Amino acid sequence: MADDDLAKAIALSMQETNTSRLVRHEIPADNSCLFNSVAYALNDSGDDKASELRGMVAGLVLSDPETWTEAMLGKPPEEYADWIQDSEHWGGGIELAILATSHEMEIAAVDIQTLRVSVFGEGQGFRRRALLIYDGIHYDVLVRRGPSGEERLFGVDDLAAVEEAKAVAKEAQIARNFTDVGRFTLRCVSCQKGLVGQQDAVEHAKATGDINFTEY
């Protein structure tokens, strides 16, 4: 779609929704932000939804070991199933792909640092899409709010919503509201060792078993 056509599509979308706009709905930073973002988009949030979705992911992995192999998961399926159900562990692309398929929807995640849009569940014939925004270590959900209420899921052909999501991410990028996972500094809560970047944290966790880190 040409830039002029896209601008018209966005303008039309805004007119049709009575000046509604896409905004960032903040999700608590509790290691389950990915799962809680998806739950909110599904209008199915609650105190136990993250653990429910973690259990769903684990169950689907164990039920389809031909698809979700050790090579895909980075660990044996049984080990992964235990790992993802631990509330201390973050979700990522694998979990988004599984949740997209299990809920028959696309999940588009916009990365603030790069403005890249990763779409999970794409090409599977789904008709609806959730929009998430990612700052390097945390997920929030994007919703459209206006006089008529709040829209949490969008049609897969709603190109204006995706462009609005990228615009929200661009504003956050300009404000430097993201974490560069290759350079951010962490401290291990257990042993107080200073670490730089995600890879340092992964290697430290493998060597010591420590998984609690804080940014400083």
Image (cartoon, rainbow, N blue to C red):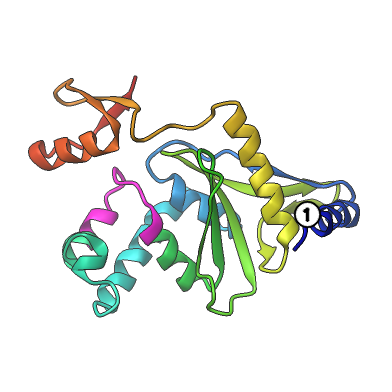
Where residue 105 appears, as percent x and y from the top left, is 56, 69
Residue drawn at x 28%, y 78% as measured from the top left:
63
Residue 186 lies, with reference to residue 171, above or below; the image says above
Residue 170 x %, y %: 63, 38
Q: Is residue 215 left or right of residue 152?
A: left
Q: Residue at (48%, 49%) from the top-left corner?
A: 36
Q: Which residue is mark 1?
A: 3
Q: Quadrant of residue 72?
A: bottom left
> Which quadrant, please, contains the C terminus?
top left
Q: Is residue 20 left or right of residue 136?
A: right
- Which residue is at a point 34% across and 29% down the rendered structure image? 183
Q: Quadrant of the N terminus?
A: bottom right
Q: Residue at x 23, y 35 (%)?
A: 201
Q: Is residue 139 above or below residue 99?
A: above
Q: Which residues are magenta?
A: 81-94
Q: Which amino acid, by three-letter code, is at mark 1?
A: Asp
| Relative horizontal placement of residue 47, taking residue 115 as reference (left or right) | left
**Residue 90 on the magenta span:** yes
Q: Position of residue 17 (x, y in %)?
A: 86, 54
Residue 18: in magenta span = no
How many marks are shown on the rendered structure? 1
Mark 1 closeness class: few <14, some 14–19, many ≥20 residues within 10 Å: few
